[in-house]
Amino acid sequence: MALAIAGFVGWLFGSIPWGIAIFAVGYLFWHFRQLHRLQDWLTSPDAEDPPTSHGIWGQVFDDVYRLQRRQKKSKSRLKAVLKRVQDSTAALRDGVLMVDSQGNLEWWNRSASRLLGLMDRQDIGQPITNLVRDPEFKAYFEKAEYDDPLEIASPVNHEMTLQFQITLFGRKDRLILCKNVTQIKQLEAMRQDFVANASHELRTPLTVISGYVETFLDYQDTLPSRWGRALNQMHQQSQRMQALINDLLLLSRIEGNQHSQAVHVHAPAMLGRIFEGAKALSNGRHTFDFDAQQIDILGIESELDSAFSNLIFNAVKYTPEGGHIAIRWYANDHHLFLEVKDTGIGIDSRHIPRLTERFYRADPSRHSDTGGTGLGLAIVKHVLLHHEGQLTISSILGKGSTFRCQFPKHRAITNDMEETA
């Protein structure tokens, strides 16, 4: 319609093309003017309401205004959520830190500042490994294997022990939780000291009592007959108590030897000695298979001897007469294994996850019969932790059990390696 009016005006003045051209220039100028108003409105920090216009530009202004209001509402909600998250994490007693994929610190709460000595203005954007200057933390952070937490001393107070747990998210960004476990470590140390001291103090009077009971048993024929059963029970229970104290002391020593120096252990020879002891304990009641490859291991010999003895002797104790026990020491491309397999009565699957807990008994009656203390598998677990290993247990009721110790291959020492050295 506007073009028709422009053509009619041009006809009145004797030139239709000039009328249309003048109209087109004016129309174009009007569009440029609307674009300029839109730009001024969008770039002005104080502008609230959109410019007034009509036609398509009025609709554009109204649509942009609605989008802006929607965006502001969404932004306000996100800000409220973010503020709530920040307020809640700020109230935590544990430190929370966010680190980008390059390892640079992006955000942390007040507890992290207190535990790690971080400064709000200076440390933002700094590499976390420059702020927590500990070789163990640097290796743990860069290895990016965060299944297990890391415990180190605080950089601001070496008497404080911190536990770090890192979680990967996004594009290899990291969320770091930092917890003060000083009190837990102190309580654990107190528990270990108490168990060790109490066991040590109990050993002397128990030895005296056991000695007198054995003396009475030697002269049992001269004592009243009704004393015989009582003396035998006293002797049996004192022996069980002595075994329990020995295991408690051994477990305390293992827990305290976390930084002991690993040495070359001749594993096949050690297993051979344990195997001979197992045959003597069996006294012909079982059949055996023994296969030990000529592979030694880097470790602590006394601890490995205790762990391997527990597994092999347990197989003898808990396998009924006529059963079969197989012992294998072997390696594959990635790991080194000790496997002890028996044909005993087996273990219910619901007990397996808790077998390595102290004093946990899947069947208390079996421990009464065999004199078990409930600490054997706890000793095995702690020994394997010292040697970067793990214990796997598989069992089927009525068919037997398999206990497998797994060690990393870098601890294996072969004859070829010895000759090269």
Image (tube, rainbow, N blue to C red):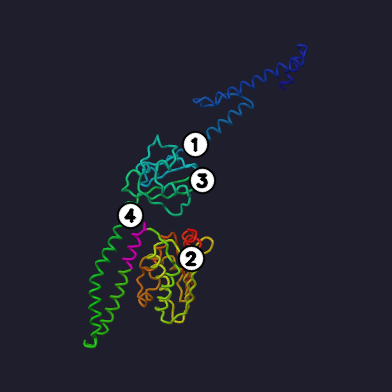
Label 3 vs label 4: CA separation?
31 Å
Residue shown at the point (55%, 33%) measured from the top left: 66
Residue 200 place in picture, x, y as percent: 26, 66
Label 4 vs label 1: CA separation?
45 Å
**Which mark, by number, is residue 295?**
2
Disc 2 is placed on an element classified as strand
Q: Is residue 363 above or below residue 118?
A: below
Indicate which disc, 3 or 4, sits on the residue closer to the N terminus.
3
Find residue 265 and report its image quarter.
bottom left
**Of the pair 80 and 20, the residue shown nearer to us:** 80
**Which mark, by number, is residue 185?**
4
Label 1 vs label 2: CA separation?
64 Å
Label 3 vs label 2: CA separation?
40 Å
User: For the residue marked with disc 3, what is the amino acid?
Assistant: Lys
Q: Is residue 252 magenta?
A: yes
From this viewpoint, is residue 415 visible? yes
Q: Is residue 136 magenta?
A: no
User: For the residue marked with disc 1, what is the amino acid?
Assistant: Lys
Part of the protein shown in magenta? 247-260
**Which mark, by number, is residue 172?**
3
